[in-house]
Amino acid sequence: MKTNAGLPLLFIFVILLIQSCSVPKNIIRLEPDREPDKWLFGQAFVSDSVYGVHYEVGFDKLEDNRYLFDFHITNGSNMPILIDPASFSCRAYNGSMTPLTENQAAAIDPESEIMGIDKQLSINKARQKNQFGATLAVVGVGLAAAIITGTDNNPHNDYLAGEITADMIDDVRISGMEAEFQAQDLNHLRDSWAASTIRKTTLDSNYAMYGKVLFPAFPEAAYLKISLPVDDHLIEFTFKQIQFPVQ
């Protein structure tokens, strides 16, 4: 009895192909649970204030499993206030407004993110220095090979030494380029966190600040409630999560 050895391989290939197919994810939007106080280029903002501290909050987008919100904060009180996004929090709820999490989830702290990026940049800088040292070592190997092969009369050895040295230099050069590109990406990411987000700031009276605040995402939630402390009070905003299927 003959068997077709290609069928099992074909079956495995089909299974891997099916598993590798990516299905488009639903588009997720968070909409205020009440009439927006204002619109800005299609973005709905809700607002509230306590003790003269005024917050305007609008959902921007979901990215990398994080909710991005735009915040406009105005200090209308007669005293400076500390704005610290690390003290902001959110909580996910189901359709019956039952909490899906035992505790509040803290907003993403920009200072921690920037510190993490700085650590990666330090590692990357050390890597680039190591690559420079490796380049010098390769040049030394090439010189040694040239000296050794130059003492014999076999032209094949000259060619072989040149090929080995060239390959080693190419490997080091490619690795150095990868480190440089990574450093560029990290610097761009750091600049984005530093310039675009609400960061820990003492906001003087009659001053305002603008920027993004990021919260962890809860795709299974029906509602999301954001809590913002102002002295002994809380300002809360509730958003309804809507999923739009991609067809």
Image (tube, rainbow, N blue to C red):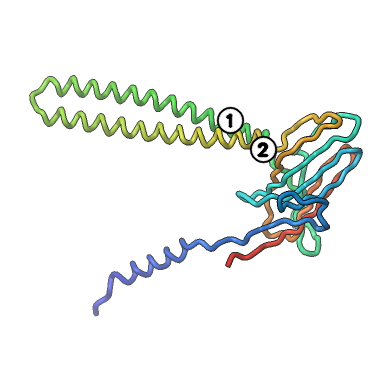
Quadrant in which residue 50 is drawn = top right
In this rendered view, identify the residue nearer to me: 202 or 100.
202
Question: SS at mark 1?
Answer: helix
In this rendered view, identify the residue nearer to me: 14 or 166.
166
Residue 162 sits above or below residue 226 on the image:
above
Mark 1 nearby-residue class (10 Å; few <14, some 14–19, many ≥20): some
Side of 217 where 170 appears, left or right: left
Q: Which mark is residue 33?
A: none
Residue 118 position, x and y percent, is: 58, 30
Identity of the amino acid at label 1? Answer: Asp
Quadrant in which residue 175 is drawn = top left
Side of 46 where 118 appears, left or right: left
Tell me which residue sits at (9%, 27%) in the image: 154
In this rendered view, identify the residue nearer to me: 156 or 188.
188
Mark 2 nearby-residue class (10 Å; few <14, some 14–19, many ≥20): some
Residue at the bottom extreme, as displayed: 1
Dot 1 corresponds to which residue?
118
Dot 2 corresponds to which residue?
196
Camera-side mark, 1 or 2: 2
Side of 56 where 192 appears, left or right: left
Q: Are marks 1 and 2 in contact (CB under 8 Å)?
A: no
Question: SS at mark 2?
Answer: helix
Label 1 or label 2, whichever comes before in sequence order: 1
Residue 88 sits above or below residue 14 on the image:
above
